[in-house]
Image: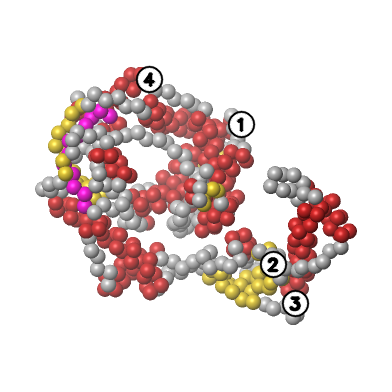
Amino acid sequence: MITWMQKHKKYLIITIWISTIAFVGAGFVGWGQYSYGDKAGSVAKVGSIEISMGELQKSYSSLYTQYSQMFQGEFDEEKAKSFGLKSQALNQLTQQALVLNLAKSYNLEVSDAELLNEIRTQDYFLKNGVFDKELYKEILLRNNLSIKEYEAGLKKELLIRKTLKLLPIEAKESEIKILDTAISIADKINYKVLDTKIINIDTSDEFLKPFWESKKNNFMTEISYDLKFIKQAKISKEYDDATLTQYYNENKTSFKDSEGKILSLDAAKDKIKAELDAKETKKEALKTYVTYKKGQAEGVEIQTLTISPTKNPFGIDAFEVISKLTLTAPFSKPIMVGEDYFTFELVKINQPKAKSYEEAKNNVIYLYIDEQKKAKLLELAKNSFATFNGITTDFITGNDYNTITDLAGEEAKEFLSMLFTTQNKRGFFTLESGNVVMYNVLEQKLLNNTNTDQNNQIVRLKSAMFSEGLIKNLQNKYKTEIFIQGL
């Protein structure tokens, strides 16, 4: 029994069917030209849900990044083609669209409050543990995503989650007992960790430059914009009491203290003056903008500057406006930056291009060292895993990662996860960190343990199986049309 279960551990891995539409940090990978059918505006239609080319490109890009990480950077367009990555990307989107059709049939929606709560709890938008709006904008900008685009995608993801939660799945007692048996399999192993720190790499130009040549399209300059701009500095004026009182009476509900109580006129005077100054500054900036656009702004100082996402003194909001300017519509209306207003004129768009060797060298060297260390460590493992002698453990299960003390906690979890899903008695694993662990399974036995989390694990496994059946059922219910060829 133990031997059979050891050989078939891979079938006991708990998996979750996750529908991910919105993503950050995946980068972008395009794939050239395709021919279309009658509907060039979309690449597919599932039921009443249309799938756009933009969604397909992002799905492909996300998958490409995941595979690239799995293959430790050794993944290119040829490999992507052989894996049918484009078809995978479209299939992922059509499956998501099937669930969205189901949600639509139940009149399910995601509220703005639910969306905001999800955004505010996502780790990559937190600064010192608190949601940071400027960080949120900056991360989306760096990933070529508008706020509207990102939030629309995230709403779809939340709607898919909500829909699947309507279909509860429970674990049976007999299933819990089976899982208890499976996770009680224990191995006594001999293992040895090969750390990347033991490998030294020659980073002279003789080795580094050919590496850069093979990957130079991965090291691109930022997009940048050559600008002309005029600045309208803050105008400060004196206002009589009648003006201040009138403005206060018209806008008093916007002047509140920290407890939400409306401030008195005297307490609000500084804020009133600041708002009146801002209105006067904007009014003057708009006058100058009109004359500048007509080429009649005599006596106005025109400055020039080139900005990029990382070299931008005007802030995220201004950059977003500038990035949408075109050479046929190059002028922006006045934009407030601090207490001043700026009007921009786009002169030139500098598209990303491959960096020279010297420009890219500081980035190349880290990637080169990382790849070379992994390659050399892998070679060392291949030559020694059959004869190595390392540390011998007691009988351990997949949950006993704390006993693997010469690996960090996450590394130990990763190692045991792979160990208890392999069919090989002796071998080695490459961890995400690049470190390699060689192992030799010496003995096996069945422990008398009870898993305290077996119910959740069975539910996750059954959810994966249920999701597969759900998709097949929805495919029969909702028609899928593909308008793109060449996948």
Of marks 2 and 3, the one in the foreground: 2
For the point 50% across and 45% down, the residue is 122
Q: Is residue 460 visible?
A: yes
For disc 3, the marked residue is 297
**Segment colored magenta:** 183-194
As for residue 212 lying within the magenta part, the answer is: no
Query: Residue 276: where, in percent of width, then height?
Result: 79, 61
Question: Tag 1: residue type?
Answer: Asn
> Is 141 situated above or below 175?
below
Q: Callout 2: helix, strand or loop? A: strand
For disc 4, the marked residue is 172
Q: Residues within 10 Å of mark 1 (few under 14, many from 20)?
A: few
Q: CA distance from mark 1 to mark 2?
A: 47 Å
Q: Residues within 10 Å of mark 2 (few under 14, many from 20)?
A: some
Question: Tag 4: residue type?
Answer: Lys
Question: Tag 3: residue type?
Answer: Ala
Nearer-N-terminus badge (1/3): 1
Q: CA distance from mark 4 to mark 2?
A: 66 Å
Q: CA distance from mark 1 to mark 4?
A: 32 Å
Label placed on residue 340: 2
Q: CA distance from mark 1 to mark 3?
A: 56 Å
- Say whether residue 106 is left or right of residue 258: left
Of marks 1 and 4, the one in the foreground: 4
Label placed on residue 92: none
Q: Residues within 10 Å of mark 3 (few under 14, many from 20)?
A: some
Q: Callout 3: helix, strand or loop? A: loop
Of marks 4 and 2, the one in the foreground: 2
What secondary structure is the stretch in magenta mostly built from? strand
